[in-house]
Image (cartoon, rainbow, N blue to C red):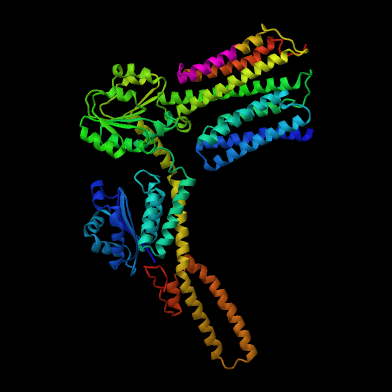
Amino acid sequence: MELVVVGLSHHSAPLALRESVALRPDELPGALEALVRADGLAEALVLSTCNRTEIYGRARDGRGSAAALDALDRVRPTVADALRRHGYALGGDQAIDHLFRVVSGLDSMIVGEHEIAGQMSRAYGLACSVGTAGPLLHRAVPRALQVGRRVRAETALARGIASVAGAAVGLADRVFRDLATCRLVGIGAGDTVATALRALRGRATGPLVVLNRTLERAQALAGELGGESGGLDDVAARVAAADIVVAATDAPEPLVRLRDLQPLLRARRERALLLLDLGVPRDVEPSIRDLNGVYVYDLDDLQAIAERGLYARHAEIPKAEAIVAGAVSEFRRRRAGLEAQPAIRALLDELLELRRDAIEGDRALAATEREAAERVTGRLVDKLLRRLAPRMKDGTVDPGALLEIFGVEHRPPAVDAADGSTE
Amino acid sequence: MEGLARFLIVLAPAVWTASAAAYLSVFVREDRAAETWARRLALTAVVLQLAASGTVGALGLPMVASPGGAIAFMGLAVAAVHLVLESRIGVRTIGFFPVAIAAGLSLAGASTDVLRRPETQLPAWSTGAHVLGAVLAYAGLLLAALYGALYLLQRRAMRRRRFGLLWERLPSLELLDQFSWRSLVAAAAFLTFSIAMGHVMGRSPGLAFEYSDPKIMFTNMIWLAAVLLALSRGFHWLRPARSAAGCLLLFASAVGNMLLVDLVSRVHRPH
């Protein structure tokens, strides 16, 4: 029973390709069923996020990852083709290692991000509900989720700020006690403002206004984030009424000017104002930084915060790698132990058979001598197995080769994909 | 009983110190295991300190009657208030500061003879109330100054764009400002109470005093400044940074009043 994984991620494919192969949530149940029906995989799980699309499973006939690609070929030929050209296909210990690394956040674009563990948990839940998760996935995925939790608890890999959007939230957190009551204003409706506002909106559920030259774009973003929209006519008044402002436009001159803002700020009393100027050229006049209670930060500041966080996270990678390596080795040992059980049973039966043949074949033995021989050979078989079984379990002795020496014909138990029971 | 009292008086600073060390680990390394232990140790220290006060009280000596006992009790009040605030806001990264203060004050208290009987017999209730009020007022001023100092440090980090350890670990400016102001309000209230009790106490035969005494005048000035500062911040007449700086100055004045003005004053001396 070997875990296989085929997929592509931010390491191997550009964003456009990742978007083209990503599966929508409503497509996943059908895709899972089709993958198992397609005769290549006995078990299947699909993990599809914005940074990776991966299929985890167990090949039916021991063909490894080729079986997964063949199955995918029958279900989604275009995706299979993209995976062949830009993806990776792993099997056995490499696949287990990959699974554990992915769930721990070690393989993520932002190292240590923990959203991936939730995504994997949901993917596994779906595979269970559709019935495409079998004994191997039932063992591997929960163990991977456990390892992910351990990595997050025992290392600082998932702590701190590691993105520009996260830095925006971090700065807001250091100014305001409760972001939920903060009033947000976005100046511009491009990707930069949208990303920062989305991150802030996760915590700041108060009023939100998106101001933009093109009203349709402002309306679209405001609609997505549950706010109002407006033009750039009364920027200063909107800013003076806000708590957190995110600005990123392509305007050649600053839109937030000292002479407009200063008179309006008197009405705020001492309530702080956080201005995140992410535009190049700047949208907030630099002299505004000198105003009391106004905190202005630009893209460089936010990047500096994110880089510091990433640096701290990277320092934790060796610790996390060690946890994952230990878990992979432990998983392999347990799996080998489980897989060696039938071979140990077959070897025991064969040794007992040889013993019976040897004793019963010697007709010259008296009854008392026969009893003594049975006792002694019984102990011998027991000692032999006690020495061999642990080595068969940890893989230092190949169970198949050993059985071949004794001339035992051994067939690994077949596993039914639907209910996971062994025949 | 005396042996038990001495044992508890010595044990409390040790537990405070262990808790401060655990909180330091939380501050520097965000150590999750230390986070749990830091709080447990601090709560144990609170219980030990209260038990020490109770045991000393059972010997007929109010804990706050001696300077050492009052200092240790002030540390206890500082840490206890912070532990309550900490459980309400869930921020455990700044626990090191108040708990380290509690450890230091508890150690200073333990190094004096807490079990020494006072030389003069004063009315028990008014003395106790006066001293307890003063201790709690000083604890409030100390907390207001501590949160004010942390506010100024966080503000400085943000103004100078120094996104280092302090910036990461300290909570929001708004929170520190609110904590500082609330501590100041509590300090002003306790100071008012303590001064009133001191006036009642001063009428007792053994302790006459004059209103022109430097100690009385300076204490009244500190009280006035505390009330004015609390009101100015409460009505938003004063910016948070100025209020924080004011709290620091006020605490420094209170310490000066306690240590220096006492030297030239006739109050607190038996006649």
Quadrant location of residue B198? top right
Q: In the rendered image, which quarter contains the C terminus of chain A? A: bottom left
Instruction: Pick out the residue farthest to the bottom.
Output: A364
Q: Residue at x 46, y 16 (%)?
A: B237
The quadrant of the image that shows the N terminus of chain A is bottom left
Q: Residue A157: percent from the left, percent from the top?
A: 43, 43
Q: Is residue B232 magenta?
A: yes
Residue A191 appears in the rendering:
no
Q: Nearer the viewer, residue B32 or B48?
A: B48
Q: Magenta span covers which residues? A: B221-241
Q: Is residue A18 visible?
A: yes
Please say if B56 is above or below A72: above
Which quadrant of the structure image shows residue A69? Answer: bottom left
Which residue: 32% across, 55% down?
A54
Q: Is residue B7 magenta?
A: no
A181 or A277, nearer to the observer: A181
Residue A77 image point, x, y percent: 22, 60
Image-based side of B204 in relation to B141, left or right: right
Q: Nearer the viewer, residue A222 or A31?
A: A222
User: Residue B162's quadrant in the figure?
Assistant: top left
A21 above or below A364? above
